[in-house]
Image (cartoon, rainbow, N blue to C red):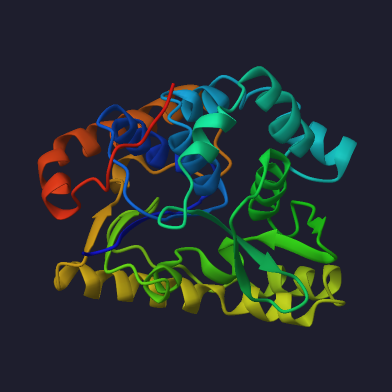
Amino acid sequence: MEKIALIVEGGGMRGMYAAGILDSLIQHNLYWGNVYGVSAGACHALSYLARQFDRARRVNINYAQHLRYSGLYCLIRHGTFFGFDYIFKTIPAREQIDWYTYFHNQSNMRRFYITVTNARTGLAEYKSPENPQDAIDWLRASSSLPIIGKPVLKDGEIWFDGGIADSIPVRKAITDGNTRLVIILTQPEGYRKKTISSTTEKILQKMYKKYPALIDANLKRADTYNNSLDHIEQMEANGTAFVFRPSESIIIDRLCKNRKKLQRLYDAGYEDAEKHLMKLRSFAPSGGAYCGH
């Protein structure tokens, strides 16, 4: 029997495309085996795994324009572009996560992995939460961008955004024995990441001189990312990957806070999933009932 996994790329507010797709999957009870999420993709995947339709859309569109969510206020007050206490404490208190449903559906055959980058080693690690606070900590770490964000200290290590070391954990999923992958990307077809500028490199060298492996991972990020895209295209060609990509016409900046643009991107994701529903069912038959309230 084939093992099918779902991979959800990050990309900040571009993740609204993934949120739309995941809401469609919730409505059609489409769940498979392991889920691998990165940064914003991991945050949206948690709402999906808790079977909370529309939660991912609400927590972004309804709160993104609040001064405590992101922007100059957060930089001045907390030294980070995103207000993580607001995002990971205040909002979840208002838009509560259904932890019962999430943990009730975790098993040896179906695990949620949050991708993070270890500052000391510069390598990606994949964390499966053991309890609600564990999940929030790893989501926060996976979303902690260098330069404009603060790292997370957990288990005696410093952690950053999972996208630094592994933006699209395809090889991890394959190593775990998955033979078919459903992949949600947040960049359009043909996109390739550019290497970081010399100015950004200088800032990284100054800010993170204690973590040379982290700097190296950032310098190699474009190659790592583009190699993953090449691998995904090969899998598509041989029929082992089903890939969702947004059209170039709806792409937004990762820091976008415009409600209309965010809603448009979410709607595009939802519509793409609905349009390709029959093909998706054929490619990846649902792996058993997924229970919820």
Q: Identify the image quadrant of the C terminus.
A: top left
Is residue 98 at all visible to an observer of this figure?
A: yes
In this rendering, position of residue 238 left or right of residue 197: left
Above or below: residue 62 compared with residue 120 = above
Of 165 and 282, the residue lying toward us? 282
Above or below: residue 259 compared with residue 102 = above
Above or below: residue 28 compared with residue 165 = above
Residue at the spot 73% in from the left edge and 81% down from the top edge: 213
Q: Position of residue 150 (x, y in %)?
A: 80, 53
The quarter of the picture where residue 283 lies is bottom left
Counting the numbered discs, the total is: 0
Q: Position of residue 104 (x, y in %)?
A: 50, 37
The quarter of the picture where residue 221 lies is bottom right
The quarter of the picture where residue 155 lies is bottom right
Q: Position of residue 116 (x, y in %)?
A: 63, 62
Q: Identify the image quadrant of the N terminus.
A: bottom left
Q: Position of residue 247 (x, y in %)?
A: 27, 46
In this rendering, position of residue 68 left or right of residue 220: right
Is residue 70 at all visible to an observer of this figure?
A: no
Of 75 and 134, the residue lying toward us? 134
Residue at the spot 49% in from the left edge and 76% down from the top edge: 224
In this rendering, position of residue 80 left or right of residue 110: right
Of 44 and 233, the residue lying toward us? 44
